[in-house]
Structures are given as structure tokens and as C-alpha cells.
Image (cartoon, rainbow, N blue to C red):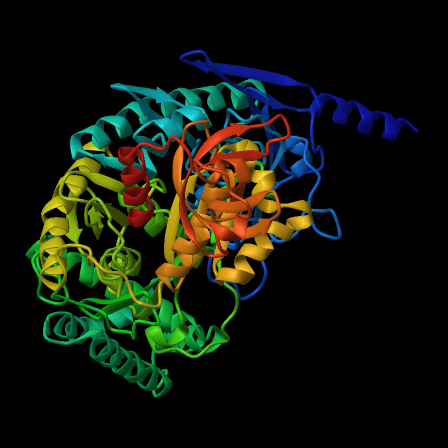
Amino acid sequence: MLRLRKEYRRKKNWMEEINKSISFDGRDIRLKVGVFAPQAGGAVMIESGDTAVLVTATTAKGREGIDFLPLLVDYEERLYAGGKIPGGFLRREGRPPEKVTLTGRLIDRPLRPLFPSWLRDDIQIVATTLSMDEEVPPDVLAVTGSSVAVLLAKLPFYGPMAAVRVGLVGDDFIINPTYREVKNGDLDLVVAGSPHGVIMVEAGANQLPEQDIIEAIDFGYEAVCDLIEAQREIIAEMGIELVELEPPEVDPTLENYIQEKATESIKQVLSEYDLDKNQRDEKLDTIKDSLAEAIAELPEESEEEAKIKVLVESDNGLLGNVFKGVTKKLMRKQIIDEGIRVDGRKLDEVRPVSCRVGVLPQRVHGSSLFNRGLTQVMSAVTLGTPGDAQELADDLHPQDEKRYLHHYNFPPFSVGETKPMRSPGRREIGHGALAERALFPVIPLSDTFPYVIRVVSEVLSSNGSTSMGSVCASTLGLMDAGVPITKPVSGAAMGLIKEGEEVRILTDIQGIEDFLGDMDFKVAGTDSGITALQMDMKITGLSLEVIADAIHQAKPARIHILEKMLNAIDVPRPDMSPYAPRLLSFRIDPEMIGLVIGPGGKTIKGITEETGVKIDIDDDGTVTIAAADGKKAKQACNIIQGMTKKLNPGDVYVGRVTRIIPIGAFVEVFAGKEGMVHISQIADYRVGKVEDELAIGDEVIVKVREIDAKGRINLTRLNIHPDEAAAARATAMNS
């Protein structure tokens, strides 16, 4: 009983509630610890407005044989958070929407570099949005909350870390803008940082100049520093100190042996600048295999030789990892000391670029092939009708549909590998979203180009920077499809080598430079400014000065690539593929939508069956008609416009006689809309029989005499001025 009481008291003390609040221009961020999820290693509720995200961090002892950091980040959205019930038969959350996957990546990217590289414990971060208003996005709250949870879990961590969103309203930057402010502004920038500097940047922008982007990052990092200080206050109040563990001792014997036996051979391969990726990898593998054979044949005459054999035999992957580490050091030293990269390029030089358009038959509405070095991306464009827009129903976010979709595929053959092909993973979804963000600012508005656009980027060969290759290939594909983009977009990936105070920025990094470097910074934009950024670090932070240098160095690379692209196609094609749907778009009175649809959809179904077109009607009355045959689309257009046009007394039209009855004739003045000419209104003299003057199919000039209380249209052939008749004929001919 006494032990239970002590446990209760200890738990009660642990559950002591601590609240911390910080304000940015009237927008509060509230941190609450000590209340939720007591069995998690660390837990925090982070709130702003009515948006609340619970973030937990839990750890378990590392598994045998793991040679990487097993960090698992999960982001969850509960639809009850927005007062919604999920759709589908089960009425519960199912496969995560794309936005959820992207938010999980957003949390992971700044968090991962801040754990020690030698850490092998299983770590799981779970961020769950439990309440959400339509003003405050939860993603940056979840990023900051993950840092708090890790600190509370007392994990080794080079933090604290925090993230904020920066918007641009007019000429002013604002911290953590609302959804509306982001939509109406020209910038959506997320900045994450640690005490050591900026660690992650992700942005979509409306062709903003480089200097504006740099100032926005600086503005955001100032707010990040305030959130870092708030976290320090919380852990100090709870008596928690930052965990600083010494890295495990690494026996240098094997590394010294490899450096002694293979340094010159590795340097020779790294200086053979005419080798391509596969040739270089083969030569390095040959050196590694030779080392393995030499180690296997060591006579074990010395203690060092015996130790080397034991180390390699006890860990199958040790030789490869140490060899990779030695190669990494030599490659980085070559760049720092000589300013020369493994393929012989200067630090700011772009690989050879070639472009082609129309590489697929016109059944594909637009296509292109973009090559940069050994990286090759093919993009295919499909034009669809408004009904093809992606619905975002089971989602907490205000956007309800997307009319521009960009998908990215990375098959194993692109890197010469064999492995099962599954549904798109986080990386594929992330790269597709980045390319979508880069191109979205130049996509024409639906008012001028009502098509839904889907672009699929197929990576056919990968040696670094495939996401920026997707941006370039897709720009070409859109122009080949005849999409009137406002400006072409290109992109380049920047890298970094940092050794102490020595920093080298690399333009257009290839695979080995990405793998062995410290930064992957993707910059996309037009010749007028930046449309998208994504920066990921492998070190614990970077100064604004270095980031600014990378952004500025990317511009001439983007312009150079853009010039190569414009040599293949410089403006969108004036004509679309003959297999692309032809769209006619116009508006009707929203009150007339029910009339066009008809009871149970009978009327609209009849129109589609008669003309063979596809019809989409929006709630605002926008009607879009799609057909392969333009004449059929025009026929359907005339029918709907005729049904919905409001006639006024005195209007004159060219009509066609459709029926004759004893007291008069029915005349169709628009497709689907007719009125009656009474026998007394057929001529200015007495008419004995309607058939004496009119026959079915006759074309007649009629004037609207009146529209009665029941909506019936009464027409006349009398008192029509010759000028009115001529104008009616001209209108009929033009339509």
C-alpha cells in the first residue's frame, strides 16, 4: 500500500501542469505539458487559436544489426478535429491524404539531423491533430511540438528546434499566417531552425526576387529563436537538462588500414573526371573487393592484423561503411582544397543539358524528355474536364479540390536496381508536391483555361536532382500540350561541403555529392523570381549568409538551364492535341441549374445522349462542356443557353416552326425553348388555316409579345422593323 502511494505521488508530481505562451503579432502559440499521454516518453499539447496538436516522443532499446537511426515520424489527423464524420462505408479514417504524408515529412526533415549520427535506439514521434479551426494550419505547430516532446523524453538531441510559417501580405511579412492570408499572399514559407542556425526551408512563392526570399527566411528565423527560448524555459522549469552523451568509442584500426592501403587508389578514381556514375562505382567496388580479399589473407602475425580480421568477420557491413567514410572524406577534401568535383566540374558549373518535346504520340496530350547529366526525366501531360478535379473531402484543410495535379514516379530501374514496386512512398509524394508547388504560380486560371491538368514525371535515370528535373521536364510538357503557362520554370539543386570554417557551395549536385554532402537545397523559379524552395540539412544548422549565397548562386544555373529548355520549345503550342477534349465554358443563372439538370438528372442526361458531350456544372453556375467534336460541344452549348436564357418582351429572334395546332404554331427560338405564335399574330391579314402560311421546319422571324404568369412565351410576326429582323439574322448566323 505504501509503495502504491509513493508511485501515486511520483506520478502526480510528474503530471504537474506547466503552460507557456508566446505571441507573434497577436498570434499566440501555447505549450502545455504534464497533462496528456503520461506513459509516453515525452508529450506536449501545442495550440494556436482553436488548433491543437498532441505530439509524443517514445523510445525503445536499439535492435541488433541496425546501422542507421531508426526514427519513425507519424502525423495523424482526426476528422473529429474539424467536426467532420469520415466518408466511405466504414466511416473512419483510412489511407492518409497527401497533406498528411507531406506534414509527416515536414516534421521528420528538421528533426532527423539533430539526433547524434551514432544513435541506434528506436524513436517514434507521433503528432495528432485533435482540434482545428479554419484559420491556423497545424503543420508548423507539429514540428515545434516534436522538439518539445523529444526534450521531455530526455533523448540525446542537438536542439531545441522550432518552425514557423512566414507569409507576405502586401509588403509586410507575417508569422504564422492564416489559410486565407497564405492563399491571398505571394509567399508560403516554412522555416525551421536550431540554436546552430537554419536547418530546413520549404517555400512556395509567386515569382519573388531572391532578396525577398532571403529577408523572409531571416524574419522567420528570428521567431524560431523565440520559440527555442520558450522551450528552454519549459525544460528548465521542469528540471530537465539537455542530454549530452559521449559518442561510443570507435576502433580506428580498420579505418587506418583502409586509409593506408587504399587512399591513393580512391583518390585516383575520384580524379578520373571522365568516368560516369556507374564506371566510378564499379572502380570503387573493385578497390573495396580487393581490400576484402587482402584482409581475408592477412597472416595475423601482428595484433593489429588479427584485430582487423576479427572486426570484418564479426560485422559483414563494417568494411563497406568504413570504406564509404574514407571515400567521403577524400571527396570532400578534394572539393575543399582543389575546388574540383568528382566529374571535373567547377563548383558553380551545371552538367550538360538536353531537352526534347513531343516524345510520345499525341494520344498523350503533351510530353517531354529532360536530360541533365545522367539524370533523365520524362513528363506526360493530360488535360481533363472540371469533373476530373481531385476532391479533397476527407481532409481537415479548407481547400476542397485541386485542378492542377503533379505526380512523380521513381522506378527501381532508374538507378539500375531490382526491387518490388509498391504504391508511392513519402519521397515520391514529396517530390511530386515540390514540383507542383514550383509550377502552380504559372498555371493559367480556370477562367481562361478551364481544363484540369495532370502532369506525371517518370524518372527514367537518376543521378541526383530528379525533383528539379521533374520541374524542367514538366514545363516543357505543359508547353507541348498547349497549356498557356504565364512563364517557363526551371530548377537546380544546390549542395554544400562544410569542414570547420571552410564552406563550398555546389551547383547542380549529382548523386554522390548529395549522399556525401551536407545539404540538398532545391531552388525553382522563372527568370523573374523564385516559385519554390526546399532545403534539407545533414548538419545541425546553417547561417543565413551561407543560405543567401546558395540562393544567389542558383540563379545563373536556373537561367542557363532555362535557355536550354527554350531551345526545344519557347512558347506554348497554339493548338492542343486532337485527342485532348475541347471545352466550352460559360455561365448561367445559378437559379437555372435545376432546370438544366431536370428531375433525377433527366434533362442533362438527355442533352449528353443527344450530343455525346460531357457536361459539368459548378454551384456558381459555370457550365463546362467537353467534347472531341467542337460542333457537338457548340450544339450542347446552344441547348443549355437556350433553356436558361431569359426572354424579354420586344426581343426579336430567328426561330424554327416545330409544331402546328389549329390556333397557332410553336416556334423554337433557342434550343429547348419555344413559344407560340397565335393564328391572329401570323400575318397582318386574316389567316384561315395556319398551314396556309407556315409548315413544320420553316424559319421565321418572331418577336416576343409577352410572357404570361405561368412563364408561357407568346410570339408574334407583326410589327417587326426590318433592322430588327436583320440584326436577328446576323446573331443567328454568328451562333
Residue 378 at what x, y percent from top left?
29, 68
In the image, 683: left or right of 59? Answer: left
In the image, 363: left or right of 6? Answer: left
Res 399 visible: no
Residue 306 at what x, y percent from top left?
39, 77
Q: Residue at x 40, y 28 (%)?
A: 164
Frontmost residue, 144 versus 298: 144
Frontmost residue, 132 versus 302: 132
Residue 242 at what x, y percent from top left?
48, 31
Q: Residue at x 37, y 73 (%)?
A: 319
Q: Residue at x 57, y 43 (%)?
A: 664
In the image, 15: left or right of 350? Answer: right
- Residue 324, picture quadrant: bottom left
Q: Residue furthest top?
A: 26
Residue 619 at what x, y percent from top left?
53, 36
- Residue 218, picture quadrant: top left
13 is higher (above) or lower (below) than 400: above
How many numbered dots are placed on residues in this image?
0
432 is higher (above) or lower (below) than 84: below
Q: Residue at x 34, y 45 (%)?
A: 437
In the image, 399: left or right of 56? Answer: left
Res 3 visible: yes
The quarter in which the N terminus is drawn is top right
- Residue 573, picture quadrant: bottom left
Frontmost residue, 688 versus 564: 688
282 is higher (above) or lower (below) than 728: below
